[in-house]
Image (tube, rainbow, N blue to C red):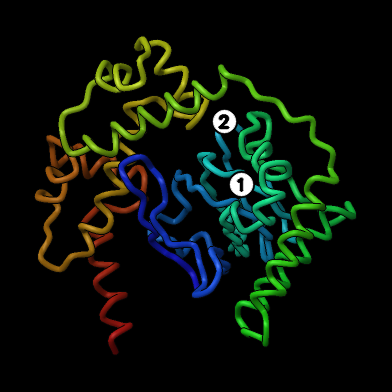
Amino acid sequence: MQIKNFKVDDRLKELTEHRTIALPIACYETTINQNVHGYIPLHWHDELQFVLIVKGEAIFQINEQKIMVQKGDGLFINSGCLHMAEESNKSGCVYICLNVSPEIILSQELYTAYVSPYLQATNLPYVSLHANEPWGKNILEAIQKINEWIQDKTPFYEIDITTKLAFIWKNLMINGFQLEYDQTEMVKNHRMKQMINWIHYHYAEKILLDDIARAGGLSRSECCRYFKRMVKKSPLSYVTDYRIQKSLLLLQQEESNVTDVAYQVGFTSTSYFIAKFKSSMNMTPLSYKKYKMNASDHKEC
């Protein structure tokens, strides 16, 4: 199963329920270019995420850093970290995504000593997993095995999965991280989420740079620096891109029209909306709407 249009709340937190019937985990294959946006947009979740690239290559951004991940390798993305992904070189990237509630990794007695410190560390937003390193190979093979168990639902597979999760975590710890807890880094991440939260709540209204900076308790110049570091674009460019993201689903509604959609997502000019949409999506909003309507008709046939 692939989630092609996962929902996020006003804080950019993903709302997908990551669990099987019995366990607070989810595992699915994701083809990046099949997402409604053509990429996996910026989001975060409480769950730990383990990624294994099975086809092509992808560029992941986690907090401020961009990482290229190739076929056969993967990533661990820590709880609460902002991240997004796009395929690289039109490779048709497909990856297995394993999302796990931290509480299931180890027993309650071991959680405080062996899991909680890793969740709180500020120097561990992600870990690259390489198949040419024994501990990395162990984790990648375990991700693949868990995916198979969930698909096949073999007898007692839930017990097998919990055993394999402990194995994964042990191999992650074997890498020997010196954990750090930087209060400045914690504050920075909190302020960034506050500003993004404010944008997602007010995107349909008139937004000024001062408004965004105020939401994060920053000056205008500091606000711009935060966005350039974390999302590689200016605050107002992020607003425009987010408005276009929100317009995609509205344009797929049969009764919608381009002008109404433009105003619903916060643009004050239809022509400006069309220009920005075309720059982002390489087609006009009307062409996108017709394309999606035709695709929907073919599915019904």
Can you say whether 102 is above or below 240 in the image? below
Residue sitting farthest toward the bottom: 301
| Quadrant of res 192 | top left
Q: Nearer the viewer, residue 237 or 2?
A: 2
- For numbered disc 2, what is the local secondary structure? loop
| Quadrant of res 179 | top right
Spatial CA span between label 2 and label 1: 13 Å
Mark 2 is on which residue type? Glu
Q: Nearer the viewer, residue 282 or 180?
A: 180
Q: Residue at x 15, y 50 (%)?
A: 261
Q: Residue at x 57, y 22 (%)?
A: 185
Residue sitting farthest toward the front: 109
Q: How many marks?
A: 2
Mark sitting on residue 59: 1
Mark 1 is on which residue type? Ile
Residue 244 position, x and y percent, is 29, 45
Residue 117 position, x and y percent, is 68, 36
Is residue 167 rendered to the left or right of residue 95? right
Is residue 118 rendered to the left or right of residue 271? right
Residue 215 position, x and y percent, is 30, 22
Can you say whether 143 is above or below 267 in the image? below
Residue 88 position, x and y percent, is 61, 51
Q: Nearer the viewer, residue 209 or 273?
A: 209
Q: Residue at x 83, y 58 (%)?
A: 137
Q: Residue at x 49, y 21 (%)?
A: 187
Is residue 27 rendered to the left or right of residue 117? left
Q: Nearer the viewer, residue 209 or 143?
A: 143
Mark sitting on residue 64: 2
